[in-house]
Image (cartoon, rainbow, N blue to C red):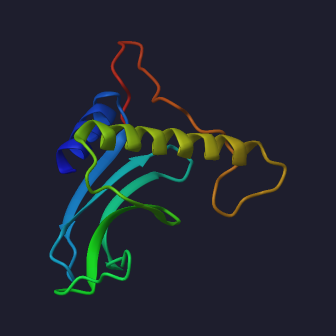
Amino acid sequence: MEPALQDVYKEFARLGYSTELISDVDPHSNIPTHALLVNIENQRRFQYFVSPVSTPIPSFGGRRAQTAENYYRLEVFNLTGSEGYDLMGLSKQQIIDDVIDRYETHIAFLTVTSNADNPSLLTPPAPPVAEPALEESGNPEKH
């Protein structure tokens, strides 16, 4: 998972986005966590945070695991909470695709909420900028 997030982080940075990739270890499970953050000027930042979540082992057909009652899922969290799915078993490209899909969904959310008549406590009223502005020299501008 980390190599996929590294690739996405590098591409966002290459395009001039203000971005961070933070790695840590979950204190309860000792499993690594990773957070990809993309700052969007005057908007809520994008967050793709992967963290282990302890989950009961499912029982199928009345069978239960003999050794443990829980296992860990690697769930994706945005700024409002869990997205409710597990990344285990996904390929590097599938994780990259998932990050990009979630980013595009976040931009769509910001666009819709900025066009709403009601003020939002979560999202400023300005529409998001899909890509960073380019300087006249053609180099991406850092935000």
Q: Position of residue 81 (x, y in %)?
A: 49, 68
Residue sticking out furthest to the front: 61
The answer to whether one can see residue 143 in this image is no
136 shown above or below 129: above
From the viewer's side, name the closer residue of 58 and 140. Answer: 58
Picture quarter containing residue 49? Answer: bottom left
**Left or right of 50 in this view: 105:** right
22 shown above or below 69: above
30 shown above or below 47: below
20 shown above or below 69: above
Q: Position of residue 93 (x, y in %)?
A: 28, 36
Q: Position of residue 7 (x, y in %)?
A: 23, 37
Residue pictured at 19% horizontal, 50% vertical: 2
The C terminus, quarter of image: top left
From the viewer's side, name the closer residue of 111 and 39. Answer: 111
The answer to whether one can see residue 139 in this image is yes
**Left or right of 57 in this view: 114:** right
Residue pictured at 79% horizontal, 47% vertical: 116
